[in-house]
Image: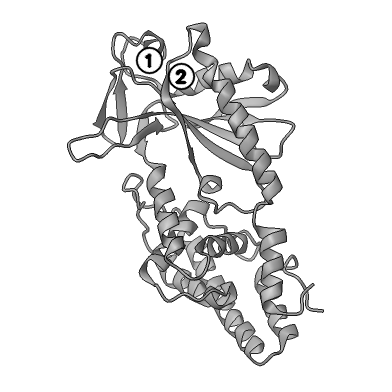
Amino acid sequence: MAKTVNAAFDYFLREKVRIDKDRSDVAKSSKSNLIEEIKKFPNDGKFPQLHPDISIDYGSFSRKTKIRPLDDIDLMIILDGQGSTWDEVGDHLVIRVNNSASKLLDLCHDFSNELNSIKVVNKFVEYLSGVTNYKKADVKRNMEAATLNLISYEWIYDIVPCFITKEDGLGKQFYVIPDGKGNWKATDPRIDKVRTQQVNNAQKVSVLDMIRLMKYWTKRPTMPTMKSYFLENLILDYYGAHNDSVQWVDRELPSLFQYIYHNVMKVLNDPKGYQGDINHLSYEERQKIKDRASTDYDKALEAIQFEIDNDMSRAIGKWREIFGDEFPMYY
């Protein structure tokens, strides 16, 4: 319960939206232990060689935009290509393994030197299943990732094997990850992380908190849920084009509802330049989200006016209509 709108949002973000710091610290420690176990995989002489950099964090947990519950953590494990090469073939990449990389050759498509990404992911599944501490865990392949579900934690690890390319003549490099179909595709999560940090640092409001609030909003049963990455980039696009934010999250929300209203129907291309359009919503889903954004835009303006009029009870009540029963009541 809260007496002011600011106090209500502070409580809501701290207790219902943001990842609890203690759980975040436990997750980071658990992830470090996981990486140490993976480092041992090549010791038997049968697992592919790991790159010296070994891992890169990606996903919303890494970008600090994830909300409760902490249900998955993404991790990319970098393999050493040992002189292998890549080519773009149609809509995917092909990795051709160097003849000296015997452990990778064992994971190629039959009668070929083209690396099979499904076999690579399954190799991770095999070795994760053999770790003593993970004997009771559920380990399996899910498209491009090996998933590790430890019974001792509430989150699942999505472990994605990858390679990093050498820099080209322009200094560009990227990561090559499984496409879920046996081939490979390009990505570079560093671009997302840097962009998020830069946009956040340029604003008075916490853009991270705005993303978190809107992720909570889209998960409510009042509309279809927007994919996390798509929604993040909508919000980053908005703040990347506006530098007039204020520090209070409630005063920023009408602008985001308005922006979603005007842009959810449109194409949104991957800012990294690899995935094309990341708006995978159907027309009907887009329309329902647009309608909800319009409704909640009006409610947000009403809430702000009530606050200006010092009617905190009605202001907080309007925000509860938008965010639901977990938003604190007025007292």
For this rendering, which residue is in front, 297 or 210? 210
In the picture, residue 149 is in which quadrant? Answer: top right
- At a point 55% along the width and 34% down the height, the residue shown is 158
In this view, 148 is above or below 281: above
Callout 2–callout 1 Cβ contact below 8 Å: yes
Q: Is residue 72 above or below residue 85?
A: below
- Residue kind at label 2, given as amino acid type: Lys
Q: Judge by depth and name the residue closer to the eye, 69 or 248.
A: 248
Q: Please count the marks in the image.
A: 2
Q: Residue 329 in the image: x percent, y percent?
A: 78, 74
Residue 327's spot in the image, x, y percent? Answer: 72, 68
Position of the C terminus by quadrant? bottom right
Residue type, numbered disc 1: Cys
Res 281 seen here: no
- Which residue, given by chain and number where applicable, does mark 2 sit on? 119
| Way the structure is coloured | one colour
Q: Which residue is mark 1?
A: 108
